[in-house]
Image (tube, grey):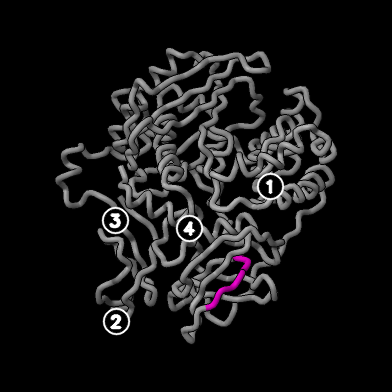
Amino acid sequence: MINRQEISDFSREFGLAANVVEKDYVLGWLLAGISGHSELGSSWIFKGGTCLKKCYFETYRFSEDLDFTVVQSDHQDEAFLVEAFKQIADWVYDASGIEIPHELIRFDVYTNPRGKISVQGRIGYRGPLRPGGDLPRVKLDLTDDEVLVLNPSSREVHHPYTDRPDGGVSAQCYSFEEVFAEKVRALAERLRPRDLYDVIHLFRHDSTKHSRKLILSTLEKKCAFKSIPVPTLEFLADKPERAELETEWENMLGHQVPVLPPFGQFWQELPQIFDWLYRTIVKPAPSAMPAMGRAVDVSWHPPAMAQAWHTSAPLELIRYAAVNRLCVQLNYTDAKGMQKNQVIEPYSLRRTKDGNLLLYAVKHESGEDRAYRVDRIRNVEVTKISFTSRYVVELTTSGIISAPPIARRSKSGIALPIRTFASKKSRRTSSSYGPKYVFECTLCGKRFTRKSSAPTLRAHKDKQGYPCPGRTGIYVTMKY
């Protein structure tokens, strides 16, 4: 199990409360246990906001629940579920040290408003923060009365923490087209803030690379299954829940994000989505920011998914602002040593051939293109000032993540998508155990694996064997 310091590092990097980060950490291990279970792994299809956060988007709202469509209806049985999650709890504890007390595993089977059986589960846990009082809990929602139009997609579960399994964790998820259609359907049926937030982000994230016709046909089948009309903007605007949607925007989403974008910014983007979906009006495709002065290493790209960068500026906050089209208040030291405060629109993170990270941005008031050296950024504050993209927001680009095969199974019957973990005794005594930090020299690009998280490098030679004057490393990743 990771320690409190790592939770604190991510809390700073993401701009979120430590308990929110801890829950995200626990969700990753729960998903490992569920996806590896001999009965649940192949018949539970992951969906919803947490699926988007953990399997699709590099930075997103921190959703708190696990939602699944259950293919086998006999899994919606209290006794079966309690026993299955006792097995998962034991496996998670052995693999990570996270405690899930058996007496805090509860499932309630009920008849939903559609007259079908649904299940809500609550699972208590004791993670790295180990608070006093009642333990925090994860909620699970299970349904089997959803129509699954497309084949599920096997996706890697994003787990940016130092105990990430060597082989990773995978889950059966709704495909991009299916989750897009499902979110539009959910928005039409219940008009909740999280559905609007999700629909806008799905449209922003590479939607033009996916089949518009497939999304539309899937949406039509889902609406027919629910006996509701295919939604239009007029249909949503006339719903009585429209006023509540705006008033509940802050209450339902504010705790899941560092800074909540204005409601109007998201509502105003809906017409563009319906124009694209129904009228095939092409989504605007702005160009990338041009290079500015310094020679850029075109082979380098920022990591696709969120991480703790261990730099003076919390770069994930900047990436979050870019994803949500929010300006950033930047405190920056220029080349002359003068400190300046500027409101910028963040677009891209690039690395020069001499090893410096550059934040490409536009000064919000003047529209001037700028490049800021990351090591000179002293402070970052995400504002509520929204912007319309002048360039491609490259900070949000993520590639396809393929899932590793599941091969082994534990004695409890849970498949192990990860390596065999050392016993608790060997963990404490082995000097090689624990997180290792990979840094890359800012001058020569050579990488170093270290036990310490300090970015200072010792004297070394570059890749050609010549002495390198670089003494500062850029954090790349962690190994366990």
**Residue 302 percent across, percent down from the top left:** 49, 62
Name the residue that disc number 3 marks.
436
Count every numbered label the image shows and give the total. 4
The reply to whether the magenta stretch includes residue 342 is yes
Residue 378, horizontal then vertical, whole percent = 46, 71
Please report whichever mark, 1 or 3, sits nearer to the chain's N-terminal start: 1
Residue 190 horizontal side relative to residue 372, left or right: right
Q: CA distance from mark 1 to mark 2?
A: 51 Å
In the rendered image, the vertical position of residue 157 relative to residue 297, given as above or below: above
Identified by mark 2, the residue type is: Tyr
Point 66% across, 24% down: residue: 147
Q: Residue at x 60, y 60 (%)?
A: 383
Q: Magenta residues?
A: 340-346
Q: Are marks 2 and 3 in contact (CB under 8 Å)?
A: no
Q: CA distance from mark 1 to mark 3?
A: 37 Å
Task: Pick the residue in front: 218 or 184.
Answer: 184
The residues tagged by marks 2 and 3 sit, at their Cα atoms, a distance apart of: 26 Å
Quadrant where the N terminus is found in the figure: top left
The answer to whether the residue labelled 1 contacts the one labelled 3, judged by CB atoms less than 8 Å apart, is no
Looking at this view, name the residue that lies furthest to the left: 429
- Decide which of tag 2 and tag 3 comes sooner along the chain: 3
- Closer mark to the observer between disc 2 and disc 3: 3
Lower sequence index among marks 1 and 4? 1
Against 54, is 41 above or below?
A: above
Q: Main secondary structure of the magenta part?
A: strand
Are the two marked residues, 4 and 3, in contact with CB atoms closer than 8 angstroms? no
Q: Nearer the viewer, mark 1 or mark 4?
A: 1
Q: Residues within 10 Å of mark 2 (few under 14, many from 20)?
A: few
Disc marking residue 133? none
Q: Nearer the viewer, mark 1 or mark 2?
A: 1
Which residue, given by chain and number where applicable, does mark 4 sit on?
303
Residue receiving disc 2: 466
